[in-house]
Amino acid sequence: MIFVDGLECSKFDREIFTELRAGGLGCVTVTCGYWGDAVESMDALAHWRELERDNADLIGVARTAADIERIAAEGRTAILLGFQNTAFLSGRIGFVELFADLGVRVGQLTYNIQNDVGASCYEEVDPGLTRFGRQVVAEMNRVGMLVDLAHVGMRTARDAIEHSAVPVAVSHANPASLVPHRRNVTDDVLKALAARGGVVGLTGYRNLSGEYAHSIGAWASMVARTVDLVGTAHVGIGTDLGRKVVFEDLQWMRKGRWSRTPQYGAGSAGNPGKQPPLDWFPDTSAFPAMAAALRAEGFGAADTEALMGGNWLRVYREVLPAGDRTARAEGGAA
Amino acid sequence: MIFVDGLECSKFDREIFTELRAGGLGCVTVTCGYWGDAVESMDALAHWRELERDNADLIGVARTAADIERIAAEGRTAILLGFQNTAFLSGRIGFVELFADLGVRVGQLTYNIQNDVGASCYEEVDPGLTRFGRQVVAEMNRVGMLVDLAHVGMRTARDAIEHSAVPVAVSHANPASLVPHRRNVTDDVLKALAARGGVVGLTGYRNLSGEYAHSIGAWASMVARTVDLVGTAHVGIGTDLGRKVVFEDLQWMRKGRWSRTPQYGAGSAGNPGKQPPLDWFPDTSAFPAMAAALRAEGFGAADTEALMGGNWLRVYREVLPAGDRTARAEGGAA
């Protein structure tokens, strides 16, 4: 069984990589940035080259699904490089391919505000995927970069699912029908995502999980309810874990450089701070206990394997490039 | 009488500055860029410093309305530095003030695509001024940068008019009720603009002017009809003149770096090229003839003066900073 975490936003270092190994994580998608433009995003990628060189005994950056399986089989954790915004493109359609060549494999279309690609979940009006956004999705399909719809507005998300030639993901969110919150995802979008073969990564992040964060058993029941909604094949984990993320980091995520006034993201004025870690999920070393909780919830061995990582791996096999050459032939998305 | 052209996109050089002087232009807003990010936009401003040094006998860059009147009185043409997009901000709210300090006095909220501020006139859905966009408008008000709504979608334009504490402009477009085109502006927006003291700069650009481009008299009749719509005090000229702009420049304006497929801007697949100059408006040396055409249309001396530049000057006096210090006090927009 390969455990996969579809999204973490930790400030990674050797201690956190050691926690990944303690949890037996086979693959983690990391957040290389939120607001950085192309050059700043290259800084972040260069930093990951250093992290990889310095911690090659614990991790390896994966460019293909085969890389993930190889790195996991070696007892290391495969890292998928991702951004939680398309700011890294700096508005250039031609940069999708260049950043794919640099190893980026997951691109979230928006963070918390409207951009040139589409609307975030916090907009008053969501105009849908823009004309540029349609070209971005097509390019991401072509070069093997997973389209991530976490934080994205519902109309933009529906458009992206429709425009994408391959499965897409919501890397870290929960069903809004279970926990009402703008950052969570409506049933119609989750069902459309599933119908196209995608995966939603469920999170225990307190602001998005309500009572389902209260115990590992409650979390497992949220998994079961989501499976009832979209099917076992379309649910995975995306913890949104932010190890060593402090309040100043939260401020950056929420305000970036766009706002002169306070912004609260998934929190609120009455709840502005970093959420304390969950008792049952201090860090990724809890993954084996989560698998056990799914078995206790009633999932069989095969379903548990799918939920703990198998579904993510299926999507990666379908979406990521097959070989070292990242760019697919023009005209054929898959 | 001070002639003002609210928008030109020429590739300025000494020959074109000489044409400005032949037309007796007192002030022209120039286009420093469409798609450039912050650093590229600084490149464009540095280029204008060179142009100003090399042509100080013909032009001077104006930072205040008093500068415009002084430079015009000296027999030179005052240049207002503008951008036809907010890409120069690179998403940073703090850059509004910095670019104002560098002399930028006109900022068009969008060019031809949705951005993080609002929608262009070519979007299928216009979600209105975004949360970032509202902060940008407030900052532009504070530092004395004119909000320009040419190329902007109608809902975003209405929102910007409403959010702005000072008059705003549509620097180069015509009433859509006279010439139906997505780049032209609906009556409700023009009336809202006028109610807040703004100005629309009418253009003879063929794609936006239809039969009103056919002769200088037809153009004058378009001015008269627009005056009927919004009042004499709210109409000016914004020629959109693109001297020495060639097809490759048009391609850049239309496609920027966002599209891998052809884009036609205000043209179309059947009409993709640069429009030939108008017989009656080869360049700005025709401004005195335009004033004469307005008199022939029936406008009196005072109204002609207002239409040829006086209305623009009124807006500049209300909006631009009063002194060399660009940033106004927090909390007071005007």
Image: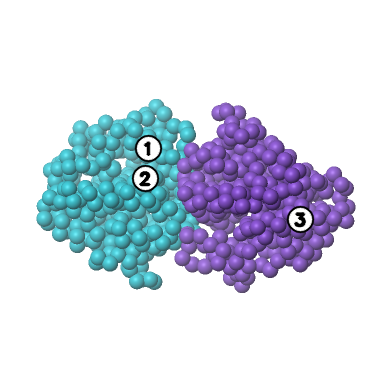
Chain colours: A purple, B cyan
SS for callout 2:
loop
Chain for disc number 3? A
* Residue named by callout 3: A23
SS for callout 3:
loop
For residue A76, above or below residue A134: below
Which label's residue is closer to the chain start, 1 or 2? 2
In this rendering, the label closer to the viewer, 1 or 3? 3
Residue at point 52%, 67% (across, down): A262
For residue A331, above or below residue A152: above
Q: Is residue A41 left or right of residue A82?
A: left
Q: Can residue B236 be seen at all in this image of the molecule?
A: no
Q: Position of residue A293 (x, y in %)?
A: 84, 57
SS for callout 1:
helix
What amino acid type is highlighted by mark number 1? Trp
Mark 3: few/some/many CA within 10 Å (<14, 14-19, 20+): some
Specify the label residue B252 is tagged with: 1
* Residue named by callout 2: B34
Residue contact at pointers 1 and 2, CB within 8 angstroms? yes
Looking at the figure, which quarter contains the C terminus of chain B?
Answer: bottom left
